Amino acid sequence: LVLDHLLHGINHREDPSLLTAPYVHAIDELAYAHFGDAYDAGLSWFFAGGGAYSQPRAVQALSPASKITVAELDPAVTLTAAEQLYLDPESMRILHRDARLALRDEAGPFDVVVGDVFHDVAIPQHLVTREFASLVRQRLTADGLYVMNVVDAFPDPRLIKAIIKTLATELRHVDLWMEGPPTAARVTFVVTASNSKRLPKTVIARTGLPRAWHRMTEDVMAYGTPPARIPLLTDDYAPVERLIADLLLGDSH
C-alpha cells in the first residue's frame, strides 16, 4: 500500500502473521512481551488507523479470540486493502471515522491501543496532544498498553521527544524502541506507554523475521535538544511540522 508517496504496508497472502515492515513487527512483538500468554488467549485491540491492515490481520491469525476495532478515516483505503491486500473486512469491526472521535465514543476498555495514523510523514496534531493521551489512558485497562509509530529525524528526533514528554504526563512508563543504529536520517520509531510494568531492555521477535528491538529512551532524550526546550503538546499548541522541520526540509532551512 502506497499513500502520499510513502510505502505504508506489505501483506503476505498466505501468512498474515508475517509482518514485513519492521515497525509493524515491533508493535506486535512489544504487545506480546507486555502481555505474554494473555496475548495468545485474546485481547481487546483498538487501532487508530487501518492502512494496509497488516497488524489487525496478524492479530487475527496469532490470537483468533482477540476483539479488534479499527478506526480508518478513508473508506477507499479499506476497500483497497480488501480488494488487493487480502483483508477480510467482515472479520473485524471497522469504523470509518476520525480515530480520536471513534476512541472517544467507544466505551472500552481496551488492552491495546495502537496509533498508526499519518498524513504524509506527519502525525495529525490532534493525535499527539496531552488531551489525546488522557483519552487513551481512560480507554485502556489497568494493564493496558499504548503503542505507536512515529517518523522523525535521527539523531535528534524533536517530535519523538515531545511525544514522550507529553505521554509521560498521563502514563507512567513511556519508552522509545529501535532495532539498532539507523542507516538513514529518516527513521520510523516505536513508542510504548503504560501504567503497569515496564518492558525489558531488549525484546526479541518470537515469530517472523529474526529481529530485536532495544529500549533507547534515556539515550535519545539525553542527546541533542534538551527536553526542557521541547514543548508539551496540547490541543492549543502542537507544532508537529515545526518539530520535524529537519526531516521535511533537510539542511536547506
Image (cartoon, rainbow, N blue to C red):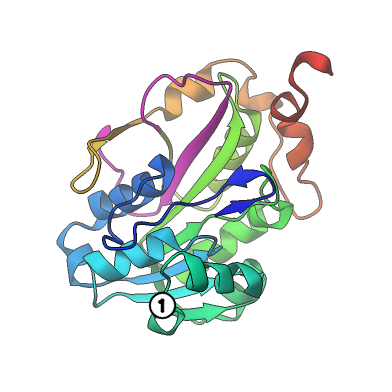
According to the picture, the residue beneath numbered tag 1 turns out to be 88
In the rendered image, the quadrant that contains the N terminus is: bottom right
Residue at 27% in and 58% down: 17
- Residue 195 picture location, percent across and down: 39, 54
Q: Relative to the observer, which residue lies in front, 76 or 158?
A: 76
Q: Is residue 5 above or below residue 212?
A: below
Residue at 47% in and 19% down: 183
Residue at 31% in and 65% down: 59
Query: Magenta residues, as a range?
Result: 178-202
User: Is 83 within the magenta?
Assistant: no
Q: Relative to the observer, which residue lies in front, 233 or 88?
A: 88
Q: Is residue 107 above or below residue 226?
A: below
Residue type, mark 1 in image: Asp
Say left or right for 196 vs 84.
Answer: left
- Residue 63 picture location, percent across and down: 23, 69
**Helix, strand or loop under label 1:** loop
Q: Relative to the observer, which residue lies in front, 94 or 17?
A: 17
- Residue sticking out furthest to the bottom: 90
Q: Is residue 69 above or below residue 21?
A: below
